[in-house]
Amino acid sequence: MTGPAAPGAGAPVRFNPFGAAFRRDPYPQYAQLRTTRPVHRTLGMWVVTRHADVRDVLHDRSFSAGLIPSQVADQAARLGQGDVDRIVRLGRTSLVFTDNPAHARLRGLVNRAFTAPAVARLRSTAVEIATKLIQPAWAAGSFDVIEDFAGPLPIAVLCAWLDLPAHLHGLVGPWTHDIRFLLEPGLMKAADLARVREVVEEFGDALRPVLADRRVRPGDDLISGLLAARTAGGDSLSEEEVIFLCIMCFVAGTETTKSLIGNAVLALVRHPEQQALLRARPELLRAAVIETLRYDCPLQLTKRLATREVEIGGERVAAGDQVLVCLGAANRDPEIFDRPDEFDLTRDGGAHLAFGHGIHGCLGGILAELQTEIALERLYRDSTELTPLGDEFDWQDHSFILRGVRTLPASIRRAR
């Protein structure tokens, strides 16, 4: 891994994700850390901020991704809560939180259903949903980009891909929001853990008859694909694994996509010259998505566990140490990206780490990109004006690893 950075000017800073200033804009702190303390120990873990070091940690399979399930169990014990085995199994069935050989087995099976062609076939569905969601805004002349558009879109698209019964469509969003604590177990209070346990049961009970129906009447949906997935040796997913994978599709894929769309719109309205460029050159839609992933990625932080002693940036990390990799900091590293703090649709931002790297690279990244591209196309193809109503933005505070605005009221004018 890379050696230590040259000393930077000014006093070293300590990573602090809890302040309001960091919530509004973490990038000045990231820049100071990359320069003065690119790898340092604080809050009981190592914090890594440079692109090369972050990439190396994510690529090195000796860093375990399986922290979350054990942290859920530990937090339950601290809170005096029992009966969390099913929640822990849910975490251990997630591709995000498993290591090989379990990860390779799950990914090999899921890859048979979650394919690029299958995602591409969702385009027309996503366009139809996005078009329907934006219709009320044309009549009103204003809307909330997050609450009325970016939030409902990924939930509706996933409901369509799983072909869930209509009566579940209004339930999966609140369920997913309640389960979000699984991604950050240390934030859970006793009531939160009890609610997660309850929701996992409710979600599973709701999906079980859907699976039974798909076994009898399979279709061109994700659940049917997961049920049909087989390896050459005849291995397949159990019913519980399919249920858990469906739940985690919502948990991992809706809040992040909502934030990606919101962050893209916010970056564009804050950079009028780039917004004008996108209107003039709609072929830059995909570039706008990629640049948002680099410039202001929804998933800012992810954690690994060192399973052996290793050096990161000149620091000796012991086996058993936790390592927090700062994806948002890596994506603004001037060693990789020229003018990293500028939002520029014409740059090549393909080296971003917004979806991770290595075997745990986000499987749903292609779906998030597709939905964000469609969302921007719906917003900018048919409108002549998209203007935020206000200068101050309320950033979500229910998560330390996710970055996105809670609301984004805007006026919108339809092209004649």
Image: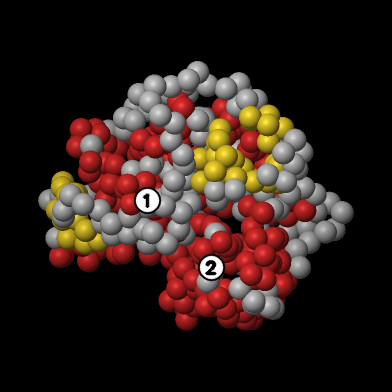
Residue 157 on image: x %, y %: 46, 62
The kind of secondary structure element at disc 1 is: loop
Write down the residue under mark 2: 188
Q: In the rendered structure, which amino acid carries the disc numbered 2?
A: Met
Q: In the rendered structure, which amino acid carries the disc numbered 1?
A: Gly
Determine the image quadrant of residue 199.
bottom right
**Which one is in front, 146 or 82?**
82
Q: Which of the numbered marks, if any, corresponds to residue 35?
A: none
The kind of secondary structure element at disc 2 is: loop
Marks 2 and 1, the one that precedes in the sequence: 1
Nearer the observer, disc 2 or disc 1?
Answer: 1
Q: Is residue 301 visible?
A: yes
Above or below, 275 relative to 158: above
Question: Crowding at label 1, few (<14), some or many (≥20) Cα neighbours within 10 Å?
Answer: few
The colour scheme of the drawn protein is secondary structure
**Which one is in front, 53 or 127?**
53
Question: What residue occupies the far top of the structure in this picture?
Answer: 6
**Which one is in front, 351 or 214?**
351
Question: What residue occupies the far front of the structure in this picture?
Answer: 11
Image quadrant in which the N terminus is located: top right
Q: Residue at x 61, y 43 (%)?
A: 323
**Which one is in front, 157 or 178?**
178
Above or below, 143 relative to 199: above
Above or below, 304 relative to 78: above
Q: Residue at x 68, y 44 (%)?
A: 321
Cα–Cα span, label 2 and label 1: 19 Å
Residue 160 on image: x %, y %: 49, 66
Q: Residue at x 36, y 46 (%)?
A: 22
Residue 337 on image: x %, y %: 43, 24
In the displayed structure image, the side of residue 325 where residue 212 appears, left or right: right
Q: Residue at x 46, y 54 (%)?
A: 400
Write down the residue under mark 1: 19
